[in-house]
Amino acid sequence: MVQTLNISVNPLPATYNILGQQMICRPDLNGYIYKVSQHTGSNYSWTVDGAEITSNNIDSSYIQLNWIRAGTHTIQVVESSGFGCKADPKTLEVHVDSLFIEILRVSTLLTDDHLIEVDFRVHDSQYVTVPLKVYRQPAMGGTMTEVGSVQASDEMFIDRTANTRGLSYRYVIAGQSICNKPVISLPHRSILLLGSFTDAGDTLMQLHWNRYEGWNGKDSVKGYERFISYNDDIKQKEMFPGDLYKDTATIVEKSLEGWRQCFRVAGLGGDTLISYSNKVCFDFEPNIFPDNAFTPNSDGLNDLFSIITTNYRSYDLSIYNRWGERIFRTDDPKKGWDGTYRGEACQMDVYLYMLRVGGKKENYFRKGTVSLLR
């Protein structure tokens, strides 16, 4: 007796290629549909990396995705026919560009207030193949002009052409996504400090500046510190340590130090963010207060002869006896004459002094006598 067995051979499903957007760019990351043509009786198994599936039925011939991670990702689908036959997987490569350019701060350089430093960070820059462009605009209006270019990995740009003592500027950095769409940072504005004497004298000075713009949320400006430096020293010190000034104007009284006094303000943002203004300097003429007698008897009262001098650029004091012999000389007004010459006490007498003090533009000369009393 011969028995027979009927065997049915079903073909593998001929899955079509996946259709859908392959270039995805921030901020449009949601609601993308990928599909294959539907075969009757088939169901589909989808796997995706770098995205979340938001469609309800993942067995269907399409899915809807929200992309959540930048980079190159793969979508895969496996079709199973109604007879249980599985096709070879079909894949589609998708590039997700989440390029984001963030300016961290704009500040004049601490060591040279003629230059402006733009610190920035580029997020998800793997698709950036050309330099980013840096643009600058006068804050009071004008054209946004290109002032340079940077690589995504540079993290800093130095503007060497800004008029830091005359203008405040807004800066942006711009690039382009793989979707050929512009990607532009939020603008940041530098701090311009201006100052002037309040009247015809030189005792009080008014300082005023614009608010720093660009820090938001937890990084918003907490306040402003004020700094002073003297003469040509680049070192500066905080005028009121621990005091954050909330306003953008202040009155400053002249110090007796230095023929030149220079001021800066610094806006403080979150954590270590700080933006320095330009430097504003005031020059002063010296004040000279001579004395006419002293008593070097070691009683701690008026033991030295010195000429109190403030706001000087240079100082030179010489003292002569009645025979014209120079018996004392100093270039430091804090060092006075103790009434001795070559280690010996000088006699009671009237001595001549000659003083030269350098001012902001010229030298001032004083000549007079001082009585040594014992």
Image (tube, rainbow, N blue to C red):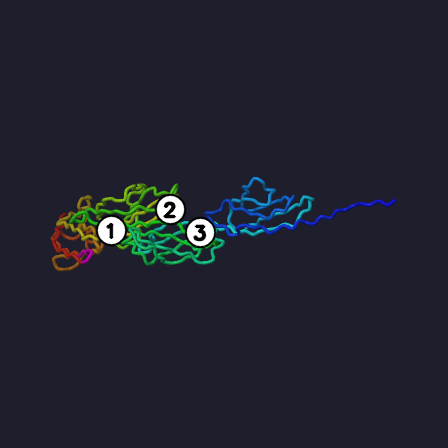
x, y (%) of residue 159? 35, 56
Quarter of image, res 54? top right
Question: Pointer 1: what residue?
Answer: 261
Front position in the image: 159 or 321: 159
Disc 2 marks which residue? 273
Mark 1 vs mark 3: which is more N-terminal? Answer: 3
In the rendered structure, which segment of residues is drawn in magenta? 356-361
Residue 5 screen position, x and y as percent:
80, 45
Q: CA distance from mark 1 to mark 2?
A: 26 Å
Could you tell me which quadrant the N terminus lies in?
A: top right
Of labels 3 and 2, the one closer to you: 3
Residue 185 shows up from this direction: yes
Q: Which residue is mark 3?
A: 122
Residue type of the residue flagged with mark 2: Leu
Amino acid of disc 3: Val
Query: Which circle, 1 or 2, is nearer the viewer?
Result: 2
Q: CA distance from mark 1 to mark 3?
A: 39 Å
